[in-house]
Amino acid sequence: MTSWRKYILGWLLFASVFTVADTQPGNAFTSAQYRDQLDGLVAVSRQLENNQGDVPAPLKQLPHSWRVNLNQRDFEISTDGVGGDVRRYEQDKSATNATAIRTRIESLRAELDGFERTPADYSTRRTELNSILARSEFRDVHGPTWFDRLKRWLLERFFHLLGKLFRSSAIPTLGKYFIYGLMGLAGLGLLYVVYRSILRGQEFEEVVPKDLPISAKEWTIWLSEARAAAAKGDWRDAVHLAYWAGISFLERQGLWKPDRARTPREYLRLISPQAEQRETLTALTQIFELTWYAKRPAGEATFSKTLEELEKLGCR
């Protein structure tokens, strides 16, 4: 089937959903109609993802919001997020931006399924997660200890002493060889430290940036990198980057003082149990820890759930 025929088929499906919806009292979608609406938009966005052509009419003509009647209650669901993704695609018609449109619509679809589903019992998962964090490989996950600070101070004093010695022009030849020997030992020691750091694994180094706090990078950049990783099918890294987008967003709001050595569990402890972000950050942290630390298989659904939690925080 040619590309223009696919667009026509997607438009007919989209138009049919609107025709049915307009016959309902108060123009509110039922659950089934809203699901058909989202399914039609997903189909159109997939065509856009494959072709990177002009934005189809269904995506251009989105209403300001959808009214949906669920369980005898009316909900107003904003389309600002999808509309923003569409505008970004019109400025840069790339596969990454097209994927972002589809991912956001699918996250709305997942929200609908989650609302209609009976709440899951997470007590078993919480017990499993706590048992994972109690393993020996997580014993060293902490910030700099007093011994680390002592080693750093001793190294600084040592190199300061070397600098003073080399500024002197009256060092005998034998003394120079001695200094050169000390420099060689220092270089070997530095290589050993680097080697040990590599053996401990690169993943922990990526989780806690060493040079700058998380909020030094805007949350929008973290999220853009997450969507780029998702477009390449690297779901695990996409979840990892999306989690730090949420941390950067909350840190920018001043919920805590930036500290690059803080662990995910420490971020949770900094939020008051009464804070509105507490429950959402807890869910986001569980997804991240199971995907990144426990190395559970991650897929598109995992990333969609992560984006759903980010939107609850206000990352839109």
Image: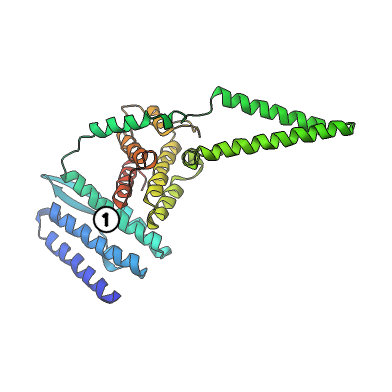
Measuring from the top left, give residue 85's x and y in whole percent: 36, 57
Residue 79 seen in the figure: no
**Is residue 114 positioned above or below 186 on the image?**
below
**Residue depicted at 44% across the width and 28% down the height:** 139
Identity of the amino acid at label 1?
A: His
Picture quadrant where residue 57 is located? bottom left
Query: Is the N terminus in the top left, top right, bottom left or bottom right quadrant?
Result: bottom left
Q: What is the image's colouring?
A: rainbow
Residue 10 seen in the figure: yes
Disc 1 designates what residue? Answer: 64
**Is residue 117 positioned above or below 88 on the image?**
above
Total marks in image: 1
Query: Does residue 197 appear to the left or right of 118 in the view shown?
Result: right
Q: Nearer the viewer, residue 168 or 4?
A: 168
**Residue depicted at 26% across the width and 34% down the height:** 125
Measuring from the top left, give residue 222's x and y in whole percent: 44, 47
Q: Nearer the viewer, residue 267 or 164?
A: 164
Picture quadrant where residue 51 is located? bottom left
**Residue depicted at 27% across the width and 54% down the height:** 106
Local secondary structure at mark 1? loop
Query: Does residue 189 appear to the left or right of 65 in the view shown?
Result: right
Q: Residues within 10 Å of mark 1 (few under 14, many from 20)?
A: few
Measuring from the top left, give residue 185's x and y in whole percent: 71, 34
**Is residue 119 positioned above or below 16 on the image?**
above
